[in-house]
Amino acid sequence: MTFLAKPAVIKVRVALKKSGLKDSVMELEQTAKTAVEAASALGCPVGAIIKSLVFVIDRRMVMALVAGDHRCIQDNLPTAFNIKGSVRKANAGEVKDITGFTIGGVSPVGLTNPLPIVIDRSLKRFDDLFAAGGHPHAVFPIAFNDLQRMTDGIVSWNIAKPDQDIPAKNAPLKRSATFLKGKIREK
């Protein structure tokens, strides 16, 4: 059986189609359980990988979508969601129950239960992002605006910081119109 025919992956494919996007879930030969593995399999920067992380604030389940080259700042999540309480990472059983996905393949779309979602603003650095497609061997490309629209996520600068363990390979900066061939443009 192909990974694309797994029930969890089909949920993601259906969610993409229902939102007006094409079914772009790809099957990978190598596993994409981590952001580093996914980036290696896709040949893209680690930061372009969307980590779907589930947390519990007080007793409320939430999801943070964080760039692969960043770490979530758990202590900032209550403020981002406007929820009071202590924060802890959800365990594997809780993640499976609330999302319908197993850790390593948690998709930000096609969730079994709706969750409040916050999105790391640093993901906007990339034109092409990649998210888990419901299985560790399935991913799909998505633009930042489509990700925000599909998840109805809150965009925040304050939920993540660069991961010092991952070498920074940021998307190239776009050249400013102020500069032309290394010289300041005359106005």
Image (cartoon, rainbow, N blue to C red):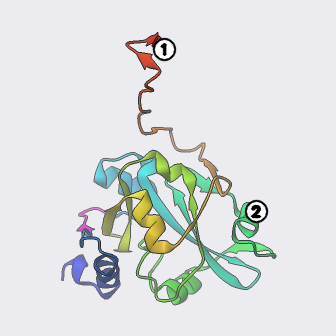
| Callout 1 touching callout 2 (CB < 8 Å) | no
Name the residue: 34% across, 77% down.
19
* Element type where label 2 sits in the image: helix
Q: Which of label 1 and label 2 is nearer to you?
A: 1
Q: Does residue 50 show up magenta in the picture?
A: no
**Closer to the camera in the image, 20 or 115:** 20
On residue 75, the disc is: 2
On residue 187, the disc is: 1
Q: Amino acid at mark 1?
A: Lys
Q: Which residues are magenta?
A: 26-30
Residue 166 in the image: above or below residue 58: above
* Element type where label 1 sits in the image: loop
Distance between the alpha carbons at the discs numbered 1 and 2:
46 Å
Q: Is residue 160 left or right of residue 51?
A: right
- Residue 179 location, x and y as percent? 44, 18
| Location of residue 49 (image quadrant) | bottom left
Report the residue that reaches farthest toward the left.
1
Q: Residues within 10 Å of mark 2 (few under 14, many from 20)?
A: some
| Location of residue 17 (image quadrant) | bottom left
- Residue 14 location, x and y as percent? 30, 83
Q: Residues within 10 Å of mark 1 (few under 14, many from 20)?
A: few
Name the residue: 45% across, 38% down.
169
Q: Is residue 43 left or right of residue 1?
A: right
Q: Main secondary structure of the magenta part?
A: loop
- Residue 58 location, x and y as percent? 77, 81
**From this viewpoint, is residue 82 visible?**
yes
Q: Amino acid at mark 2?
A: Asp
